[in-house]
Structure formats: structure tokens, C-alpha cells
Amino acid sequence: MSGIDKVERRRVALAESALKTLGELGYARTSLREIANNSEFTHGVVHYYFRDKIDLISYCVRHYKTMCARRYDEVVETAHSAEELATGFLAKMTQTLVEETPMHRLWYDLRAQSMFEEQLRPDVEAIDRLLEEMIWRILSRYADLTGTTPTVDAPTAYALIDGLFEQAVVGYAANPEKTPALLTDRLLQVLPRLVTA
Amino acid sequence: MSGIDKVERRRVALAESALKTLGELGYARTSLREIANNSEFTHGVVHYYFRDKIDLISYCVRHYKTMCARRYDEVVETAHSAEELATGFLAKMTQTLVEETPMHRLWYDLRAQSMFEEQLRPDVEAIDRLLEEMIWRILSRYADLTGTTPTVDAPTAYALIDGLFEQAVVGYAANPEKTPALLTDRLLQVLPRLVTA
DNA sequence: GACTTTGTTTGACACTTGTCAAGAAAACTC
DNA sequence: GAGTTTTCTTGACAAGTGTCAAACAAAGTC
């Protein structure tokens, strides 16, 4: 294994450990020492592999994006009817809401932070673009399968779906049992309005 | 002026000063000393009027809500046609986006923080409810004026509109010139879909 | 096996944070 | 105007922060 690859592996390990802590505590309350404590490394190692805190967080965000924006690809590719696509999409979405809550919390936290911390903006923008494309792939396919066309453009579709999902992520903290069903219900109200009747 | 009123006045003054700083720096980077420095008071006074940091922030959030959830009431009440309501609503919305950007940034920041800080949740929930009702008043009136009925329920309508607005607030940091027009355009795409044709 | 490079630990630094308490100043009461 | 209460200032505290550098260990090289 090459030296540069080993370095990259360490970075990934550190980033994943950091993401776990960040997802738990949020950006504001997470310190480098806390990240190191919740990992198998010492706080010095963190600084050895990352220039400073922002460098680490920014790397984490970039790493995170590789895990999330392709979540629905299989559903999109295998669905043979609009019905199948819709139920598959809804199932995957409520599943990730429940199983990866900390990651989603962190995402919305970091996106908010990017409004104040300029250095985070490029990474956040890149992920937002990926997510927008992801939503657009789903909606286009949905339109194809129903023989319709979308009634909103990609950024609009993303903002709408994302609004519903963020509402669910925030609501999940207070009401874990009811929230997934509510999200499903609301998406079902909205999906048909996003394509021509 | 009664003693309790004078105390309340001080609290409001402190809260407003704190809100200014919070809107500028965001929750994570705002300290009590920074708040005091950007005000006419010393950091001791802050602690005299508020038990601790959370108490202050929570008071700020509660104070903030009184300023924002009634923003569109006049438009709703004076509009005599759907056209008038829509343009009035869009105008007010882009106006507050531009003129009160820091406040909106802060709101989305604090809502994200509430996912990690339990003490913020009740206040955030209360504001979310107010905003939902605000959106619902607009949509109901819009339906009335067009002789239609809403096709989505209140929480859904709020999540959708809020998704678009948050997108605009985040985007405004990177692209202040284009964003208001984009928001208007997207809302115009969406509004007709929220009522029966 | 000596030497160099790479990786890791540890402890320190300068600084900021929230919190609090002691006392000064101001306002109020009689 | 003395005495009391309220309000504010100041300075301190302990704890935590990001950052860094010097000592140490491991791995790799010749």
C-alpha cells in the first residue's frame, strides 16, 4: 500500500470518527479534543493530518457527500413503474431519516454554519448541487414513468423536497414515532403536484 | 414606570443587542462578552438580567418571534385579488430577505442548534408553529380569492415555502444580486400548485 | 545496524469561555 | 440626609479552546 494512500486512509478514519462526534454534538459543541477522545487517536494526530479545525471539518463534509448523494440511485434504476419508484423513494427516505439522523442533523447544522463561516461555503455548495441533481434524477424518472413532465425546475424541486425533509429531521428529535409517517404523507401530497396532471 | 417594567425594558434592550451580534456571527461564534462589547453594557450586566447563556438566547428567540410572524398580515388583509395578494406577498418576502438577512440566518442557525440543545426546542417549536400559521393564513386567503381550495395541509405548505426561503437565505450569502429574483420566480412556480386548478 | 523519514505522544502556550462574587454607584424610601 | 435596595463594574476563577513544538517510537532505506 502506497504511502499517500495510507495517509488518505488515516484521514478518512479520522474524518469518520469526527463525523460521529459532530453528528452527536453538532458543530458548535464539538472540539478537536472531543473528536480525538471519541477516536483511537490522540489530539496531536488530528493536527498532524489536518492543518486546523476548519480543514478537518471541511474534509469531513467532502467525505460525507460521497456517502449520501447516490442513496436513491438503485431505486431510480430498478423501478419499472411510478408506483414502484414512489414507494421505493419514500421507503429509502424514511429509512435514512431514522437510521442516519445524526448525519442529517449535522448537514443542516453545517449548512447553517456556512452562512457565517465563508470557508465552509464551497463544500456546502457542492453538496447542495449534488443533492439537487439527485432529486432531479428522481423527479425526471417519475415524470417519465407517468408520461408527464415536471412542473418545476430542478432547484425548486430540491428546495421543496428538502424543506419537507428538514422539517422531518427537526421534528424527529421531538417526535420519533410519528415523524416518518408524516413525512411519507406529506411527500405523497406533494409529488403529484410536481408533474403535469 | 414600574420596576418590573424597567427590568423588562433592559432585558429587551439586551436581547436586541444580542440579536444584532448573533445575526452577525451566528450562535457558535457569539460569546456573552462579544454581546456585551457590541452593546452599551458590560458583561456583568448580562449575567445580572439573565441566569445564563441559554436563558439569554432563549429570551432572544422569544423576543424575535414577536417581530416576524405577523409580517404579512397587512398584505393578507388588504389584498382584494389573488394577483394583488401574490405580488404583495412576494414583494414583502424578498424585502425581508434583503433587509433582514442576519435575522433569517440566525433563525435557521438556531433551529439547527435546537436539534442538539434541548433547551432551545420549546421556543423553536413555538416559532415554527407561528410561521406555519402565518403561511396558512396566506394560502387560505389565496385560495379564497381564487375560488379554489388548498391541495396540501398547513405543515406541508409551510415546509415547502420555508424550503424555498431557506434556499434563498443560504444562497443570498453567495449571490446577493440574483437570489431575490430567483426566489420570486420559484415561488411563482409553486404557488399555483398549492391550490386546486 | 546506523540513519533518515514518517508517524505519534505528550505537554505546554496563549487565549477565550461561562460564571460568579465583592464592592462601588445609583436610585429609592422614609 | 441616613439607610436600604437595586443596579452596575470590575476582576477573578476554573475549565476548555486551537495550536504548536519538542521528545519519542516505528518504519523504511542504505
Image (cartoon, coloured by chain):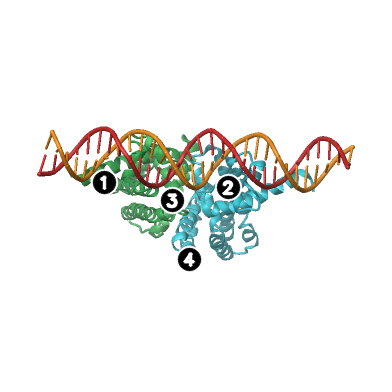
Chain colours: A cyan, B green, C red, D orange
**Letter of the chain that mark 1 sits on in the rendering:** B
Depth check, front residue: B194 or A56: A56
Q: Residue A33 carries which label?
A: 2
Say whether mark 3 and mark 1 are on the same chain. Answer: yes
Alpha carbons under labels 3 and 2: distance apart:
26 Å
Depth check, front residue: B189 or A63: A63
Residue kind at label 1, given as amino acid type:
Thr
Instruction: Give the foreground label among 3 and 2.
Output: 2
Tell me whether the residue at label 3 lies in contact with that at label 2, contact meaning CB atoms closer than 8 angstroms.
no
Q: How crowded is mark 2: few (under 14 residues within 10 Å), some or many (20 or more)?
A: some
Instruction: Give the foreground label among 4 and 1.
Output: 4
B141 sits left or right of A143 in the view: left
Instruction: Give the foreground label among 1 and 3.
Output: 3
* Residue B73 visible at all: yes
Across and down, in percent, residue A165 comes to: 49, 56
Kindly state the secondary structure of the residue where label 2 is placed.
helix
Across and down, in percent, residue A138 comes to: 58, 56
Q: Which mark is residue A181?
A: 4
Tell me whether the residue at label 4 lies in contact with that at label 3, contact meaning CB atoms closer than 8 angstroms.
no
**Letter of the chain that mark 2 sits on in the rendering:** A
Residue, disc 3: B111
Alpha carbons under labels 4 and 3: distance apart:
22 Å
Residue kind at label 4, given as amino acid type:
Ala
Q: Residue B13: which quarter of the image?
A: top left
Alpha carbons under labels 4 and 1: distance apart:
38 Å
Q: Residue B63 carries which label?
A: none
User: Mark 1 or mark 3: which comes first in sequence?
Assistant: 1
Q: Residue B71: which quarter of the image?
A: top left
Residue, disc 1: B78
